[in-house]
Amino acid sequence: MSRPEHVAPPELFYSRDEAKKYATSSRMREIQTSLTERAIELLALPDENSYVLDIGCGSGLSGECLTEAGHVWVGCDISKDMLEVSKEQEVEGDVILNDMGQGLPFRPGTFDGCVSISAIQWLCNAETSTSNPYRRLLTFFTSLYRSLVQGGRAVLQWYPENPQQMELVTSCAMRCGFGGGLLVDYPHSTRAKKYFLVIYAGQRDGQIHKAPKALGTEDAQNEARFENKRDRAHKGKRGREDISKKEWVKNKKQRQRAQGKAVPEDSKYTARRRGPKF
Amino acid sequence: MILLTHNMLASPMKEASKQLHLKIECEEKVEKEQEYNADFLNRMIERIDWNSFCAAAQSLDVGNGLPESKEQVDSSNEEQMKKIHHALMEVDVVKGSLVCTETGRKFPIAAGIPNMLLNQDEL
Ligand SMILES: C[S@@+](CC[C@H](N)C(=O)[O-])C[C@H]1O[C@@H](n2cnc3c(N)ncnc32)[C@H](O)[C@@H]1O
């Protein structure tokens, strides 16, 4: 799969033509809508009529879902062309031209929650020789934390390029004070797999943030891949749990079953060493 | 940009306080009808900075009849609430600028979209 963030900076890639695609393609609409609906579900806002920030709102497809769900939203995007199309579509939200890597220009405690659909992977790229992705991520998460009400959540769906990027983005969010972590829906399927960074800015009195359940996982052990830094510290060097070879084989077979592959039943011989052949 | 959004915006300049409001210089505004939602409106009244809201509303000529302070807001007075709703949600500044009063930097508003991008030398 080609990655648009390697092609051009976002304000150029999301040109008039690209923006038009978002407005007219029903396939695009379908994908963005289902991602946003899942993000809203994970946001778990206590009330309808909440005030929500949409980062990388683009032409407003994600925003339309927020309106459907009964929320009022404000959108930020770096592409003027995308925002102009959102105005032409007469979306309900108010929109602002802003580069999230420069920080979000809002007063403290403004939003009840935040969603971002398919946008934050753009932050991991250095657009110019002077821009530093790590610094931009920290600026972004610091301003996001400040913009949320106490205990407010943000659900950021994105397309991480590799495990290092997942680690980088998650750890930047944690450094800026967020709790929560990365949630992976359909972790066993290459095509359906979806990444959501589900993070929260502190806690209100009496509020408990429960780790949401990932979709497409069936046993409890795999259910919530909602981990924070502290959990990770207990794991081995490569971020995996230190497990026995037998467990590893069983897990792998389980993963392949979940992908619908034909896999032999587990038995007492599973993962045993085979004797020497004569 | 509606006044609710304006009330929530802070100057992105690094010298400026994150509490400070931007001053509106309006060249063109349009009024658009928005569904009246009492529940949302009450929550937002709690959250906004009232003085800044009134000043912005005055500058757009929609400040008449607004209560002078938050304490004077009476959520059972529907006429008053509709006025607040109108000023906060239904007046859209489509052309003009937002001025950072601390640095004098102007952020242009075109087609209803405030441009809050900073230049390289402002980072
Ligand atoms: C794949 S589009 C998604 C648009 C919209 N959320 C939707 O669901 O239709 C990604 C958007 O992220 C925006 N974006 C990329 N980098 C950004 C940045 N640094 N700050 C703000 N927005 C950015 C792009 O301009 C683009 O509109």
Image: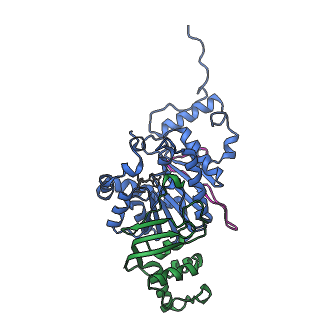
Magenta stretch?
A: A200-221
Q: Look at the image and tell me whether residue B70 can be seen.
A: yes
Q: Work out whether residue A207 or residue B96 is closer to the camera in this orientation and state it.
A: B96
Rendered residue at 66%/30% (across/down)? A244
Q: How is the image coloured?
A: by chain
Identify the chain drawn in blue: A
Ligand 1's quadrant is bottom left
Percent x, y of residue A34:
42, 56
Rendered residue at 57%/30% (across/down)? A249
Q: How many marks?
A: 0
Identify the chain drawn in green: B
Percent x, y of residue B84:
49, 84
Rendered residue at 41%/74% (across/down)? B93
Q: Main secondary structure of the magenta part?
A: loop
Q: Work out whether residue B16 or residue A106 is closer to the camera in this orientation and state it.
A: B16
Q: Look at the image and tell me whether residue A212 can be seen.
A: no
**Which quadrant is home to the N terminus of chain B?**
bottom left
Q: Work out whether residue B55 or residue A70 is closer to the camera in this orientation and state it.
A: B55
Rendered residue at 62%/87% (across/down)? B71
Location of residue A110 (image quadrant): bottom right
Percent x, y of residue A8:
39, 44
Quick check: A13 above or below A98? above
Quick check: A67 above or below A277? below
Location of residue A30 (image quadrant): bottom left
Percent x, y of residue A219:
57, 45
